[in-house]
Amino acid sequence: MNHRHELGDWLMLLALTAMWGSSFLFTKIAVGALPVEQVVAARLAIAALVLIPLARALGRGVPRGVRLWLFFAAIAMVGNVLPFSLITWGQRAIASGLAGILMAVMPLATLALAHLFVPGERLTRWRIGGFLLGFAGVVVLIGPEAVLVIGGEQGPLLPMLAVLGGALCYGTSSVISRLRPASDAVSTAAAVTLLAALLTLPGGVRAGLPAASTLSLPALAAVLFLGLMSTATAMIVYFRLIQSAGPSFTSQLNFLIPLWAVGVGVLFLGEEPTVNHLYGLGLILGGILVARREPRSAVG
């Protein structure tokens, strides 16, 4: 076994955990100073400005075929525009760590969608059990306090549902990506990001220029991190890790990212997860673990 290669896989896994797990922290900082539309548009524009020149520098040609570009458009909308918008909007009202926990349901949503649309991806009893366990975790997370109206202010139910909607979008996008015609990973990432940036540009322009008094160096740095690291660099590392270590190894991200999101929220924003948040996280991660278990006959 090549131990150097193994170390490289772990380093890429940790890098992805840091880039995607920290995106909730930086989104929380960014929406404190900028409109949601501008945060999303800027993030995607920065990523496109990195990925498109990279694809050209690597000699990747422009993907061809109307059907392939229709898939790109669907992935851009469902895998970028909608989830980025929903999660960013939701994070105006909920903690970054809670958003990271809610996003952990994505692989469970993917299992259910793959059962319907991907040949050979049938729901087993383990996957059904894992899905139900994860759903119980979501119920614990939301809790009755999320729908309460106290002092004329609505509880965080809608923001939490928005983040869950983003997780469902990511699950849907992963299924669409698996069904798309074969295409190069780097050129696919560049094309999808370009389309997503163009789709969000009008909303970013309509939001107008933010007031100088609301702008801050941390907010601008947060947007830059989201574009350069959490979107552009993370895409490249993710595709490379999938190719190097395979999807099973990469799926450990589902356990690491929520834990990282909670940790950095506590460390840098002073967030305090409630007992329900920790119970909910445990149930969701337990659901993922159960869903990954396969019958002995399928393994042997």
Image: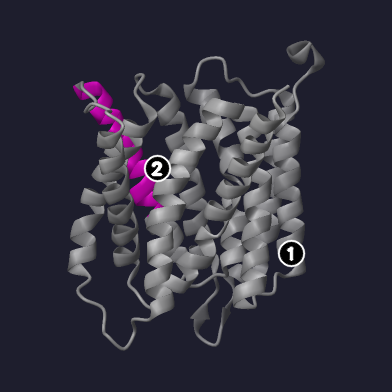
Left or right: 85 as drawn, with respect to 285: left
| Amino acid found under the numbered disc labelled 1 | Asn
The image quarter containing residue 205 is bottom left
Queried whether the magenta region covers residue 74, the answer comes back as: yes
Q: Is residue 31 visible?
A: no
Q: Does the magenta stretch include residue 262?
A: no
At x 53%, y 52%, the residue is: 20
| Residue 264 in view in this figure | yes
**In the image, residue 112 above or below residue 76:** above
> Which label is found at residue 276?
1
Q: Give the range drawn in magenta.
A: 66-84
* Element type at mark 1: helix
- Residue 91: give x, y in percent of width and height: 48, 67
Q: Residue 47 placed where, x, y %?
A: 33, 51
- With respect to residue 136, does 109 lie above or below? above
Which quarter of the rendered picture does the N terminus lie within? top right
- Badge 1 crowding class, 10 Å Cα cut-off, few under 14, some 14 to 19, many 20 or more, is some
| Among the 4 quarters of the image, the one containing residue 2 | top right
Horizontal side of residue 115 vs 48, given as left or right:
right
Please tell me which residue is depicted at 29% across the width and 66% down the height of the picture.
38
The residue positioned 73% from the left and 70% from the top of the image is: 274
In primary-sequence order, the first of circles 2 and 1 is 2
User: Label 2 belongs to which residue?
Assistant: 79
